[in-house]
Image (tube, rainbow, N blue to C red):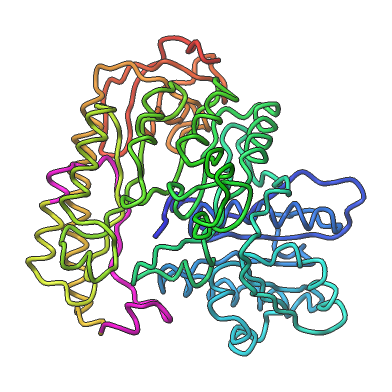
Amino acid sequence: MEKMIDESKQGAHLVLTPKAGNTRKLFIESYGCAMNFSDSEVVASILSNQGYDTTKNLEDADLVLVNTCSIRDKAEQTVRKRLEKYNAVKRINPKMKVGVLGCMAERLKTKFLEEEKIVDLVVGPDAYKDLPNLLAEVDEGRNAVNVILSKEETYGDIAPTRLNSNGVTALISITRGCDNMCTFCVVPFTRGRERSRDPQSIIEELNDLASKGYKEVTLLGQNVDSYLWYGGGLKKDFAKASDIQKATATDFSKLLALCAQAQPKMRIRFSTSNPQDMSLNVVKTIAKFDNICNYIHLPVQSGSNRILKAMNRQHTVEEYLQLINDIYDIIPDCSISQDMIAGFPTETEEDHQDTLKLMEAVKYAFGYMYAYSERPGTLAERKFEDDIPLEVKKRRLAEIIDMQQKHSKFRTHSFIGDVVEVLIEKESKKSAAHWSGRNAHNHVVVFPKENYKKGDFVNVKVLSATSATLIGEAIALSKNN
């Protein structure tokens, strides 16, 4: 379960610089994980070549696309409410076309056309290159659907259009799909099998971003630790590869090193990791390069071995804690965050207390926490009854959130008095006189603007902290500028 986009960005309209000669207007919104936002940049690039510029005004759009998430029922209901808004605009502008992209499109397929009469096209995550053909069908008065999952497509040959960009940070997709069949997760059914992107194309995209002034990238995948390039093909077929292919294969630790070496002044982040697949070589690579951030998002989902087994997570609590200890041995100041699910089927109060005990042992810096939401088509939906009452789920989730807030405060307060390097990303939401950025540990840092500018690396002395934010004063520009 990937959840690495700030809630403030959910549903943000995405805008790009107009292209000469384009006459049609595209309004595109994205919901869910970082991969959806990255995919929307691929879609915008494809449609830019088809005569579409993006617009932030829904009423001006010739084509409206919503890139959807199926991780939780709440995400799907949010999309359906947005479609109601689109419908109201379409009644005024009947020529406007509406399309649904992403995981929700893949899950519901043609059913979406029946349920949402407003929808003209439905496009799954692996079918975006077919958008020109699908739009041609729509222009001829027919509904269009392509939700075929690919075993090869990575969009590595498409230069994404950076949408609504701050010009400082960017996303680079390195893998697609997931082979880990966690029983609660719909991703394997909506995004297909794991396949990795040619490392050369990743480095080329990284270098292009550096040439355009970007200072930080996040390498994206449903499971980045499964990244494996040996000349093409699915990871599961690696056993059939030649000895030369195996000897020259690029795994995730090697890819991280390649990126760090290619642009030593750019910060490198990655998301998301899976405990069962993360090797200590990755951790050692992080420690070796100063420009790879000391931050790992390491979802665990539960602190109960019984529940982990029911989830089909291929690790125990003991193995997870050993990995955490190994990480701290190699990178003592590493910042670690979690995903946690409250109220998975059959979860007892003892299981819930085990989760709280795990959290107390690790003291995560951040957390992404949810009440269990049964997803149609998943193994959990077929195998288990959703038997935990909603009020119990809510109470357990509240206890998890309360503990995480306590630990987040503990982690942020440990920085008070330290000097941290901050990459300025934007103006602070609360004060036009302050900058906001992140340190290498992924903590938000706020400090007075003075003469610094967006994109600067600044050394900041931390003077105080909340549970979510470090507050300080700038000392000087970092040597990394």
Magenta-colored span: 358-384
Q: Relative to 67, is 189 on the left or the right?
A: left
State the image coordinates of residue 359 (x, y, percent, origin top left).
17, 49
Q: In terms of depth relative to the viewer, which is nearer, 479 or 74?
A: 479
> At 50% from the left edge and 28% from the top edge, which residue is drawn?
267
Q: Quadrant of residue 326?
A: top left
> At 92% from the left edge and 50% from the top edge, which residue is drawn?
21
Q: Is residue 473 above or below residue 330?
A: above
> At 28% from the left edge and 27% from the top edge, which residue is drawn?
331
State the image coordinates of residue 299 (x, y, percent, origin top left).
31, 52
Query: Residue 262 lies in magenta, yes or no?
Result: no
Query: Residue 364 lies in magenta, yes or no?
Result: yes
Q: What quarter of the picture does the C terminus occupy?
A: top right
> At 32% from the left edge and 47% from the top edge, which residue is drawn?
298
Residue placed furthest toward the front:
243
Q: In terms of depth relative to the viewer, which is nearer, 252 or 182?
A: 252
State the image coordinates of residue 3 (x, y, percent, origin top left).
41, 55
State the image coordinates of residue 260 (x, y, percent, origin top left).
52, 27
* Total number of numbered discs in the rendering: 0
